[in-house]
Amino acid sequence: MSSGPWRPPTRAPYPTLTSSARRSAEHDRTVSLIRRFQGGDPVALDTLFSRYYPRVLRYVQLRMGPLVKSRFEAEDIVQEVFAAAMQDLHSVVVSEPGELIHRLATVAENQIRGKADYLAAKNLDARIEKSLDSIRGAISTGSFRFDPADDGTPQMEELARKELVAIVNECIGDLSPDHREVILLRNVAGCSWALVAEKMGRETDQAVCMLHARARVALLKLLAPRLRDVREGEMEA
């Protein structure tokens, strides 16, 4: 591994969890990479972090409050998360697919909380937040223009994708705490139902399955008007 800070590839492999077979395959691959790293293979660490970078990044983006977002970049926090997690990887034992991402999420929580405490200690009060809100409002209603160098199709597609992700993230942030937590643990962290139940203090897997179903309905209700506005805006453009 190089001496400089770790950087994600342009397109990091994203481990999808759409079936028990894929979850099992991800678990086996993760365990293999951890063992290789513990055996002295630095390349395994880069591969492992590349696989989990997108999910940790999204988790951090969803967890950052307005104050932390105003002062820190999510990507920088993810770098710190991996740097801190590297120490634990020398001895960690992963027993199920969602456990590593949950460990990384816990480190992320600590990093974000530490930064929030730091900002509070520096007395960055509501006046700064108000100023930042004014700047954001000026950008959203003002003079920003997208001016691609060529015909713009690839860039516009990427811009649309980022806009959709931003809308989903904002709607998740507007959910009730329990609904937000169950979606973060299941869909972002990729934890099993058993681990979700354990982390949320629920008695059964069925209980969190039902909670997750209600959370999805709540999320769809928040998304529907936002997506309708986007579609109407595209038709008017």
Image (cartoon, helix red, strand yellow):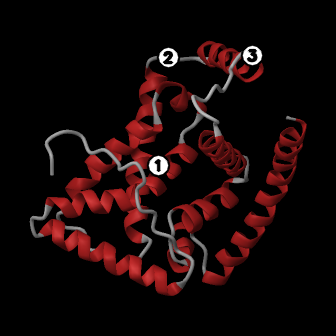
Q: Earlier in the sequence, mark 1 or mark 3?
A: 1
Q: Earlier in the sequence, mark 2 or mark 1?
A: 1
Q: Distance between the residues labelled 2 and 1?
A: 27 Å
Q: Is 162 on the left or on the right of 4, as rendered? A: right
* Proximity of marks 2 and 1: CB atoms separated by less than 8 Å: no
* Residue underneath mark 1: 57
* Residue underneath mark 3: 142
* Residue underneath mark 2: 123
Mark 1 surroundings within 10 Å by alpha-carbon count, few (fewer than 14), some (14 through 19), many (20 or more): many
Q: Which residue is drawn at 9% across and 65% down?
A: 40
Q: Distance between the residues labelled 1 and 3?
A: 29 Å
- In percent of width and height, residue 155 lies at 60, 39
Can you see residue 144? Answer: yes
**Up/down of 224 relative to 99, above or below:** above
> Could you tell me the amino acid type at mark 3?
Gly
Say which element carries label 3.
loop
Say which element carries label 2.
loop
